[in-house]
């Protein structure tokens, strides 16, 4: 495996192309009883087109908040989010979002769930169905088209979710701990599936996770956030591990270990802070 | 417990109940009179004879048909109104807030006191019974649809919006199925109340129907007729309830059911 060059440091801004996502001084504060609660403070981050960026941080640090700002599901209290150079005003129409919790329509079968993304933009039912069947095949669920979500396992539901998002061919993929509820083996299989699908047309990916190993195994860059409230981005590492990767095997690589050790060194204190704030580890 | 044992035990309960009723009302106890006077409690054989007479002479069908029509109309009208208003209130929180105290007031009112007014307004025919049933069905459907629209999972909703759905598509693909599933889950209750509305309405003043039949028997101290009427009414409700179960199973296939392990 190629020796990786580890770059420490600042918010490297590639001078070349327009970034797919740019967080420019983004601050998100929520109004709550007894005053405002600042979730994210002055976030500066660029995700280049075709880049796979993972955000890692302790529990409750505002990773998902940042992702929702990129999706346009919530608007920043200060600063701005730019998508391919255009300030984001409403929902991000160029992004697909894979949620952490159950997001499939329980009253639709797997194939209906996948096809709906095309049907809403006016593709005919027959065509949408045909494309959906192709996508189900691609995520390994060709035989499960007529099952309702509750008849599928957690991993299978995530596959349907992946197909549902990707069938619309979004330029940006936002993922909020998508494999969080799955068991360890299924997560690795899903990671490989994700990389496999991603390598076909390299969308820009912003992948939120609390699992550092998963972040390194999947991404081109790992961004670390401090413990909340008022979480900041406190580190940015480039992962120079060669592709294609196998998310299970890559964990045995020396470079992986060095990188993991270095990032963990920075993260550890923040994780402890996060736990202390969450009420003493739990 | 196996299915056969269960059915045998259920039959046993009926047999014990009917046999004790039979012996208590027919076997002489003291002075040649039975322990339980048949004048007040009738006897199982009399009741069976009465039911047999009703069906063999065919007089019962008209009453059954009237009650069924009333209940069906009350169910359909109450459901449509409940769905429309439920949707309207759930999507327009201001309207809901304005009407909230009045909805609560109307629902708190025991509907039976409306029956005489409906008889005044709509006469002794089926309309007054339908109106009473509608006031019962409407609130059940209304509250369920309102809840169903309100309680759509925020993640599913966010997902729908991220998939590019506009307001109309959200309505069709998210709110509507969710509201329907809540409505169907209350189907047994609302169908039951439609029948209650019809029968109570008939009981309070009418010229036909199962409620009328029971009332007629009561006013002539014809206890066999009362029991026969009650028995026909329960079977009628059970048959309707079984039909509802069949419909429900077809409409809610996507719902998880707790699986039984193989034995």
Image: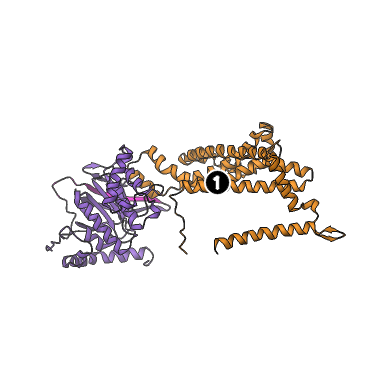
Chain colours: A purple, B orange
Residue occupying the point 79% across, 57% down:
B26
Residue A178 quadrant: bottom left
Label 1 secondary element: helix
Residue A63 visible here: yes
Numbered range of the magenta stretch: A13-32
Going by the image, does A165 lie left or right of B235? Answer: left
Residue A99 placed where, x, y %?
33, 52
Of residues B35 and A177, the one nearer the viewer is B35
Task: Give me the chain letter of mark 1.
Answer: B
Which residue is depicted at the point 70% across and 46% down?
B52
Instruction: Provide residue A217's location: percent of width, then percent of height.
Output: 22, 61
- Answer left or right for A199 relative to B125: left
Question: Measured along the vertical axis of the image, is residue A107 above or below residue B69?
Answer: below
Q: Is residue B30 magenta?
A: no
Name the residue that disc number 1 marks: B243
Horizontal arrangement in the rendering, residue B79 relative to residue B131 (left or right): left
């Amino acid at each position: 495996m190629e020796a990786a060059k580890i770059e420490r440091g600042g918010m490297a801004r590639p001078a070349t192309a327009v970034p797919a996502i740019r967080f420019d001084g983004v601050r998100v504060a929520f109004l709550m009883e007894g005053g405002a609660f600042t979730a994210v403070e002055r976030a500066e981050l660029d995700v280049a087109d075709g880049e796979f960026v993972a955000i890692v941080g302790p529990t409750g640090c505002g990773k998902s908040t940042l992702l929702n700002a990129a999706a346009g599901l919530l608007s920043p209290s200060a600063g701005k989010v730019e998508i391919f150079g255009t300030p984001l005003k409403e929902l991000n129409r160029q992004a697909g979002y894979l949620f952490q919790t159950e997001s499939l329509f329980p009253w639709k079968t797997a194939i209906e769930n996948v096809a709906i993304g095309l049907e809403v933009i006016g593709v005919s039912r027959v065509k949408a169905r045909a494309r959906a069947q192709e996508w189900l095949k691609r995520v390994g669920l060709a035989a499960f088209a007529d099952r309702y979500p509750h008849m599928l396992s957690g991993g299978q539901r995530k596959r349907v979710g992946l197909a549902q998002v990707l069938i619309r061919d979004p330029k940006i993929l936002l993922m909020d701990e998508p494999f969080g509820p799955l068991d360890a083996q299924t997560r690795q299989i899903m990671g490989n599936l994700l990389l496999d699908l991603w390598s076909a047309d390299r969308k820009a990916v912003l992948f939120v996770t609390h699992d550092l190993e998963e972040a390194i195994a999947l991404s081109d860059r790992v961004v670390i956030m401090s413990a909340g409230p008022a979480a900041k981005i406190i580190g940015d590492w480039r992962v120079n591990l060669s592709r294609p990767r196998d998310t299970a095997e890559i964990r045995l690589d020396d470079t992986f270990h060095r990188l993991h050790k270095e990032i963990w060194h920075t993260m550890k204190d923040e994780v402890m802070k996060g736990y202390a704030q969450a009420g003493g580890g739990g | 417990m196996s299915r056969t044992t269960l059915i045998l035990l259920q039959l046993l309960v009926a047999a014990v109940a009917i046999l004790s009723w039979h012996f208590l009302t027919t076997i002489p106890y003291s002075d040649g009179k039975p322990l339980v006077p048949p004048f007040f409690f009738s006897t199982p054989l009399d009741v069976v004879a009465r039911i047999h007479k009703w069906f063999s002479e065919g007089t019962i069908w008209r009453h059954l048909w009237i009650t069924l029509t009333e209940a069906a109309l009350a169910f359909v009208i109450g459901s449509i109104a409940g769905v429309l208003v439920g949707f309207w209130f759930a999507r327009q929180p201001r309207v809901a807030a304005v009407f909230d105290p009045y909805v609560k007031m109307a629902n708190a009112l025991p509907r039976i006191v409306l029956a005489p007014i409906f008889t005044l307004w709509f006469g002794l025919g089926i309309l007054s019974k339908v109106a009473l049933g509608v006031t019962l069905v409407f609130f059940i459907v209304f509250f369920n649809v309102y809840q169903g629209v309100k309680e759509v999972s925020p993640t599913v909703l966010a997902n729908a919006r991220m998939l590019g759905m506009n307001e109309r598509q959200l309505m069709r693909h998210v709110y509507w199925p969710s509201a329907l599933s809540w409505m169907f889950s209350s189907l047994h209750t609302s169908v039951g109340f439609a029948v209650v509305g019809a029968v109570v309405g008939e009981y309070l003043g009418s010229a036909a129907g199962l409620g009328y039949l029971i009332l007629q028997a009561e006013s002539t101290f014809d206890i066999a007729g009362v029991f026969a009427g009650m028995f026909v009414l329960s079977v009628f409700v059970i048959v309707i309830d079984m039909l509802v179960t069949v419909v429900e199973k077809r409409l809610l296939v996507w719902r998880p059911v707790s699986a039984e392990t193989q034995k």
